[in-house]
């Protein structure tokens, strides 16, 4: 894990690779829980028999489930000390180049793209790539915008 003593040191890392998380297995239970939480019960995520005959040969994680893993990956990769709080401010771009088949392992890769001053702190853009073990294409690429308040 990369630890930044404060916002100035974090801001000094613009353009740098922040690190890579551990691998995490995406199980059917997690996909079911996400479906229940969001109301998205499409067969491609939940019906193993039908999905086996579908375009991906297996049930797949929701794209938004894949995206929602980023907050889990972050603390495994980096930390900025001396903050009152950090908040998600939004997303600039999100793409899902390859679905995550249930049973696959995924991890997050983070790069610090931008840091700009805002009242009370900074706004940062972190470019995230969610990789699938054994695949050339990523599951998700996203620019997450966060605000770090000193």
Image (tube, rainbow, N blue to C red):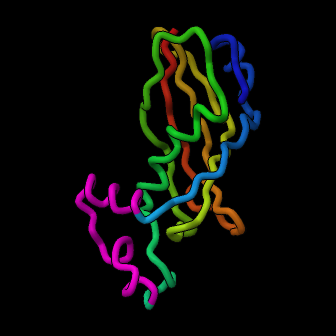
Coordinates of residue 55 in the picture (x, y in percent):
48, 85
Residue 118 shown left or right of residue 21 in the figure? left
Image quarter in which the N terminus is found: top right
Coordinates of residue 110 in the picture (x, y in percent):
66, 41
Q: Residue furthest left?
A: 39
Residue 18 shown left or right of residue 98 in the figure? right
Kindly indicate the quadrant of the structure image that contains residue 9. top right
The residue shown at (54%, 67%) is 103
Residue 120 shown left or right of residue 25 in the figure? left
Against 97, residue 106 (above or below) is above
Q: Is residue 48 magenta?
A: yes
Coordinates of residue 112 in the picture (x, y in percent):
67, 34
Against 145, residue 62 (above or below) is below
The residue shown at (69%, 17%) is 4
Q: Is residue 145 magenta?
A: no
Q: Residue furthest bottom?
A: 53
Magenta region: 29-52
Kindly indicate the quadrant of the structure image that contains residue 78. top right
The residue shown at (69%, 11%) is 5
The residue shown at (51%, 84%) is 57
**How many marks are shown on the rendered structure?**
0
Against 135, residue 118 (above or below) is above
Q: Nearer the viewer, residue 125 or 35?
A: 35
Coordinates of residue 61 in the picture (x, y in percent):
45, 64
Q: Nearer the viewer, residue 145 or 6?
A: 6
Kindly indicate the quadrant of the structure image that contains residue 34. bottom left
User: Dominant secondary structure of the magenta stretch?
Assistant: helix
């Amino acid at each position: 894990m990369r630890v930044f003593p404060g916002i100035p040191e974090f801001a000094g890392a613009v353009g740098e690779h922040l690190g890579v998380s551990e691998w995490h297995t995406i199980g059917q239970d997690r996909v079911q829980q996400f479906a229940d939480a969001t109301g998205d019960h499409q067969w491609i995520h939940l019906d193993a028999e039908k999905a086996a005959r579908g375009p991906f040969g297996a049930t797949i994680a929701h794209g938004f489930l894949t995206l929602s893993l980023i907050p889990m990956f972050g603390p495994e990769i980096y930390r900025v000390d001396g903050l009152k709080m950090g908040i998600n401010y939004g997303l600039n771009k999100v793409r899902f180049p390859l679905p995550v088949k249930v049973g696959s392992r995924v991890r997050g890769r983070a790069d610090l793209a931008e840091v700009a001053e805002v009242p009370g702190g900074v706004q940062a853009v972190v470019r995230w790539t969610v990789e699938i073990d054994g695949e050339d294409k990523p599951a998700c690429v996203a620019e997450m915008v966060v605000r770090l308040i000193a």
